[in-house]
Image (cartoon, rainbow, N blue to C red):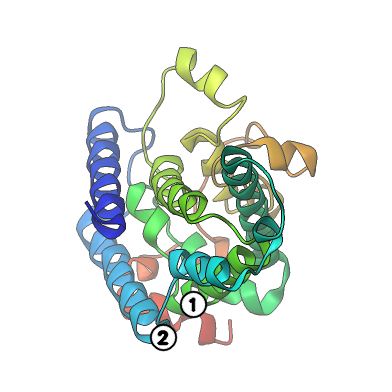
Amino acid sequence: MTEGSLRLSIFLGVLITMVALESLFPARERVQKRSSRWITNFGMVVIDTLAIRILFPIIAVGAALWAESQGLGLFNVTNLPVWAEVALAIICLDLIIYWQHVAFHRIPVLWRLHKVHHVDRDLDATSGLRFHPVEIVLSMLIKMAAVVALGAPVLAVIIFEIALNAFALFNHANARLPNWLERPLRQILVTPKLHRIHHSVIERETNTNFGFSVIWWDKIFRTYTDKPDGNLTLGLSEHQTDAPSKLLWSLALPFRRN
């Protein structure tokens, strides 16, 4: 099995599992039609994938192979055991993605792109796929630069990419975890209930829980919150209409004046 087919198989497996859990144990009632949202969210996946394939001759795994062949990056000039290099590279990449997420919230021009993700008024597994193509391109550039600077082992990059996709589907899922599972999980991982707070219409809550996998970075850098203030409304306060479920509207959103 090739790296691409392995990633696709795991992605589809996690997506189907999350959709099934959402159907069996929904956390919230939907406020928009699932069909129109899914057309938009999956449509963005197609556009994002085409943009990456057209603009980049290699992606993150290719960048790791190239850095290794050139002897570039931190782990290509150290003499650590392979397991240590893989573990440290994954931790470093995870931290970089945390700070990238923070930057996309705090820098106005980046927020204009990232709010396409936040404007979704219902959260489910497909929300973890809903990103503007310009943001996806910038994210890939950041990721590739990080991989080369670290000299991240190819295995670490493959594991990280699989985890990145799987956790995005998991923590956006509209699934209700039982308390006996939620309580211990949230001590380590970003659960759907925790990440849902990050999608609140209240700005103070939106600027918390930035982690995509582990909750440690939010606790270390004091961006963690464990519960919302009162009832939780999702999306952006200025766009509480059906417009976010439309593909062309969502693609044009960063370029609107308001």
Q: Secondary structure at mark 1?
A: helix
Q: Nearer the viewer, residue 38 or 187?
A: 187
Q: Nearer the viewer, residue 193 or 88?
A: 88
Q: Position of residue 226 (x, y in %)?
A: 65, 31
Mark 2 or mark 1: whose residue is earlier in sequence: 2
Query: Hey, which quadrant is residue 54 in on the image?
Result: bottom left
* Residue 195: numbered disc: none
Question: Label 1 belongs to which residue?
Answer: 137
Residue plotted at (79% across, 44% down): 221
Asked whether, in this view, residue 22 is left or right of residue 253, the answer is left
State the residue lying farthest toward the top: 180
Regarding residue 208, the answer to whether it shows in the image is yes
Q: Amino acid at mark 1?
A: Val
State the residue lying farthest toward the front: 79
Residue plotted at (29% across, 36% down): 22
Q: Amino acid at mark 2?
A: Leu
Q: Position of residue 80 (x, y in %)?
A: 68, 44
Q: Is residue 201 above or below residue 256?
A: above
Q: Is residue 30 above or below residue 235?
A: above
Q: Secondary structure at mark 2?
A: helix
